[in-house]
Amino acid sequence: MGLKLSHWALLGGGAIALGLTFAGVRLNAIAHTGAAYKAKVACSEIFLAGRTREAVLASDFENIDPLLDRMPVTVDDAKRQTIAAGPLGLGRASALYRDGYGCTLENQTRLAALPTIAPVTAEPWSDATINSGHTTDRVDTEQLNALIEAAFADSAAGNRALLVAVDGEIVAEGYADGFSKTTRLASWSMAKSVTATVLGAAVLQGLVGLDDPAPVREWQGDAARSKITWSDMLHMQSGLAFDENYAGLRSDVNLMLFHEADAGAYAADKPAIYPPGEHWAYSSGTVNLLARTLRQVLEDAGADYYGFARDVIYAPIGAASITMEPDASGTPIGSSYVYATARDWARLGELYLRGGVWGDRRILPEGWSDYVAIPATASDNQYGAYFWLNRDGDPGREGGQDETAREGGQDETTREGGQDETTRARFVPGLPEDAYFMSGHEGQFVFIIPSKNMVIVRTGITRGTPAMAASAPLIAALYDAVEPPAATPE
């Protein structure tokens, strides 16, 4: 029996409605990525960093995407919540601030309860050195201060904080308007180095064996993935599939950070596409999976991840400001979301300079500082254990696909910057090969330079040009203003 014209019309109308519904769902999902990014950043910068909403909304989202400009942000001071959405409410996302934990994207999910976290009570890094003008004999303080003053005079550079420490003392320091020594500053991918530090403390406690298979519960009985070790994940050589492409709004990294309640679980479900230990690929998913697995190991041992990090790392080194922000499941977003003052970022660098010892207390395993700076076997000398290395390598090698590598496919560890592509190149040609560093999107850096017993911190927002190429000349100049220590007599 043939269908009447009215039936065809109904079917056609149904198909159109279905198509429009599908398109609406897709548009909402795409809009949610931008809204979630904006809500999360605004929440952290306003309620955790303590900046004014006017300053955050006026400057932190410039020159990213015109669509992001059209997403208003509502700030609820009573709830300590931010909400962002596109036209007609598309993609609505909200982030909530909690004391001790910073901000978390709610993603239409009830946030996991977390224990009250006791603040670190420690003496702040003394101002005596920089206020008195007393420095080590090998520091050209006048040159350092001139470099920092010029750096902040260049508004296009986007510097927010600069700090130089030598022999455990702050010898130069500066901040942009609206920032100070008490302002918590975003990590982006510097968080990966923090995750490595927490893991190192767990290794020292005998809770983790680096060469043991990581006990990921989803991998039980999986012939390939159950062989992936902690070390494989720590060196970005897990072999798991993961699309670290921030330009793709529905890529793995964007879905994980801005749509999922459990970032580590999202990564745990990815298939193995290479044998573990044989292929290097930068993956924020791997880091969040490691953090989630470490959280479970610590809980099985009767410890809370946040309390463990506070008691065995942050309190002993006096880093009172460090805040690890969780996903909705309660696990720290170990790839991307840590806030700390410039001085506390420097303290973390100092911990590595001191070989994992602070005062008379060992915090990280003996040799850990060297371990994180040993190149992953498949990384062409560029990457250690969640730290970047300033070693010679192929100028065209991949570089870190960091979590907001939005500028033409390049990011803060790209190998461009005028290097002759026929030569071996370093990320910062003016620094020695023993330098290694934490690195985050838009130019968040902590450089650890053992040969000069020196730490350099640079944070800011660098857009429109690769942040490493833009920052490298300044970093090299700061390095040059400090002489190497005198040789120790044999």
Image (tube, helix red, strand yellow):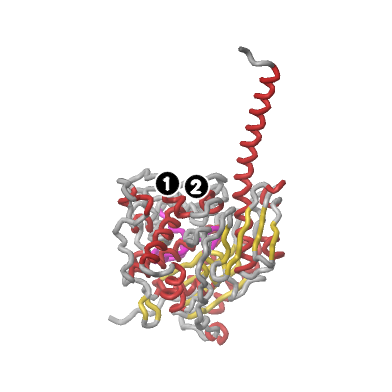
Residue at the far left in the pictured view: 490
485 vs 257: above or below: below
Three-letter code, disc 1: Lys
- The residue located at (53%, 74%) in the rendering is 321
Residue furthest out toward the front: 1
Q: Secondary structure at mark 1?
A: loop
Asked if the stretch drawn in magenta spans residue 230, the answer is: no
Whether residue 322 is visible to the viewer of this picture, yes or no, is: yes
Q: Nearer the viewer, residue 361 or 98?
A: 98
Which stretch is magenta? Answer: 424-444
Q: Position of residue 158 (x, y in %)?
A: 62, 63
On the image, the x and y values in percent for residue 292 come to 43, 59
- Are the residues at dot 2 and dot 1 in contact (C-beta closer than 8 Å)? yes
| First in residue order: circle 2 vs circle 1 | 2
Residue at the spot of label 1: 270
Percent position of residue 331, x then y:
47, 61
Q: From the image, give the main secondary structure of the stretch colored magenta.
A: loop
Residue behind mark 2: 252
Pick whichever, 423 or 376, lies toward us.
Answer: 376
Q: Quadrant of the C terminus?
A: bottom left
Question: In the figure, residue 73 lies in which quadrant?
Answer: bottom right
Query: Which residue corresponds to the image point at 71% horizontal and 50% vertical from the top-left?
Result: 70
